[in-house]
Image (cartoon, helix red, strand yellow):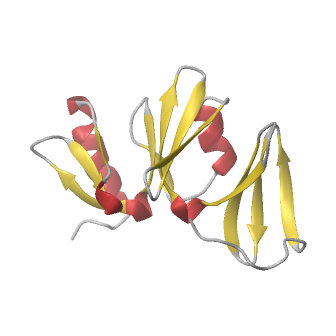
Amino acid sequence: MRKFNEKISNFDVVNLHRREVVSLFGFCIVVINSLKKREFLHLDDVVYLEASDNSTNIYLIGDRKITVDICLRECTLRINDCYFRRVCKSFAINVNQVAAFDKTKCAIVFHHNMQIKLPKEQHQAFLELLEELCICM
């Protein structure tokens, strides 16, 4: 995860129940508040989101995971970023982090050696999403 050395004082905040999206120096930042700390994450560092009951696991570059107590649907609505796409009931991905799609395993492979398996019925829908985003050549 990138580190900030600048003083965080000049930014726009959109207040969102327990989480905020911040535009800071031209980067899109997610602010996660917990009882112990306030954490600033670049959306570029988020690889994918995974539903886990009524919470969401946020998987970051460097094999780091953060769990937030809001559902995946709410999480994707709050991020509202054109690079995050829901690919099935359980996952939303950062399309900038996609390195390949393994057709034999029906798995999305990300940069940094992370991967998620899609249900077989989502295989074609994901390929159509890639075409829509002009990733396929």
Position of the N terminus, as image quadrant, is bottom right
Q: Position of residue 51 (x, y in %)?
A: 50, 30
Residue 131 visible somewhere in the drawing: no
- Residue at 67% across / 65% down in the picture? 28
Where, by quadrant of the figure, is residue 117 drawn?
top left
Q: How many marks?
A: 0
Residue 65: percent from the left, percent from the top?
51, 44
Q: Point out the residue furthest to the front here.
A: 36
| Quarter containing the C terminus | bottom left
Taking 28 as reference, is 109 left or right?
left
- Residue at horizontal 67 percent and vertical 29 percent from the top: 69
Q: Quadrant of residue 35?
A: top right
Q: Is residue 135 visible?
A: yes
- Would residue 92 appear left or right of 99 to someone viewing this image? right
Q: Nearer the viewer, residue 82 or 4?
A: 4
**Vertical position of residue 85 compared to residue 98: above or below:** above
Q: Residue at x 65, y 71 (%)?
A: 3
Task: Please state the horizontal and vertical placement of residue 116, each as a whole percent of the image.
Answer: 31, 42
Residue 7 appears at what percent x and percent y? 85, 76
